[in-house]
Amino acid sequence: MNGNIAVVTDSTAYLPDDVKNHLRINVVPLSVIIDGKSYREGEDLSTAEFYEKVRIAETFPTSSQPAPGEFIQLFETLKSQGYDTVITIHLSSGISGTFQNAATAGDGIEGLNVIAYDSELSCMAQGMLAVKAAKMAMENEAVENIIKELDKIKQAQDAYFMVDDLNNLQRGGRLNGAQALVGSLLQIKPILHFDDKQIVLFEKVRTQKKALKRIEDILETAVKNKSAEKAFVIHGNDPEKGETWRKHLEAKFPEVVFELSYFGPVIGTHLGEGALGLTWSIK
């Protein structure tokens, strides 16, 4: 990375360690609280350990955002390392205060230009933006060009996901309660997506097979519009199911690069085990 621009994101980008290390992306963790004990995502427990603990937990797990002080500490460190600009990219401000805390912290650092960027999504959709920013920073691109490129990717981006059980989202306050009730009564497989930074019900489908087919149809349109060059299949602690769908999509859409990713503890708290998602954008 060049001497001027540092890239920061939060743990819900779920970037692989080798990618974070190679691109020198700084990560601020969110936390999950299970039976009164707080765990920093990606640091205090692995994704597999999280799902194990949740199965035997007595209370519903919750998540919490990093305090502004954590961002202040990191930004001060980056400033001391000689950076004059920080691009800090976070999960949607519609479902978490992380973006706002980063922006507030950045305002308080003298002599450091902190640009808080709202991905308006999460997981590898957010991760794609952090990776692009870090690559461009390493190539000494101007900050204005990096932001312009992030805007282009975000414009082309889309994400859809399917959950086994709407109750997690409803109890976590991330989805309207009436929608969750309707879902549980009818045993539907709801397709969800982000709309105006919020998680909303996109369509109600009867079976998982039909839900995946519906998402594939939306992807097909995006491929034709040239807004889907790279995609990530995202799974909730079911890599086999994720890989099966990834291989199917790869065969159906050879022009798209497909990779596998996962819903970690914080997002898994809200979507539950067995969720499956797909996000895509331009490269």
Image (cartoon, rainbow, N blue to C red):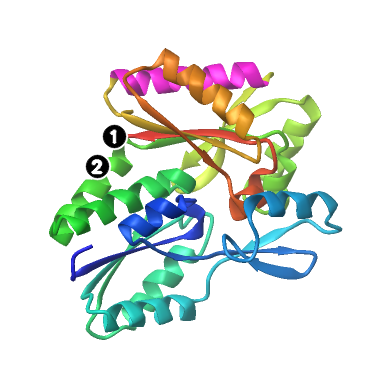
Q: Is the N terminus in the top left, top right, bottom left or bottom right quadrant?
A: bottom left
Q: Can residue 264 be seen in this view?
A: yes
- Residue 146 is left or right of residue 47, and the answer is left
Expressed as whole percent of the image width and height from the top left, the position of residue 264 reads 59, 50
User: Which of the numbered marks, if any, corresponds to residue 152?
Assistant: 2
Label 1: element kind? loop
**141 relative to 250 in the view: left or right:** left
Task: Please identify the quadrant where the C terminus is shown.
Answer: top left
Q: What range is drawn magenta here?
A: 208-224
The x, y position of residue 150, in whole percent, is: 26, 49
Q: In this view, does 274 lie to the left or right of 143?
A: right
Name the image quarter holding residue 221: top left
> Residue sitting at 58 percent across and 65 percent down?
43
Q: Residue 121 carries which label?
A: none
Quick check: is 168 in the magenta stretch?
Answer: no
Rendered view: 44 above or below 92 = below
Q: Which mark is residue 282?
A: 1
Q: Which of marks 1 and 2 is in front?
A: 1
* Res. 88 image quadrant: bottom left
Q: Position of residue 186 (x, y in %)?
A: 77, 25
Asked if labels 2 and 1 touch by Cβ distance under 8 angstroms, the answer is: yes
62, above or below 191, in the image: below
Residue 215 located within the stretch drawn in magenta? yes
Dot 1 or dot 2, earlier in sequence: 2
Mark 2 lies on a secondary structure that is helix
Q: Where is residue 18 in the image (x, y as percent from the top left)?
A: 41, 52
Badge 2 crowding class, 10 Å Cα cut-off, few under 14, some 14 to 19, many 20 or more, is some
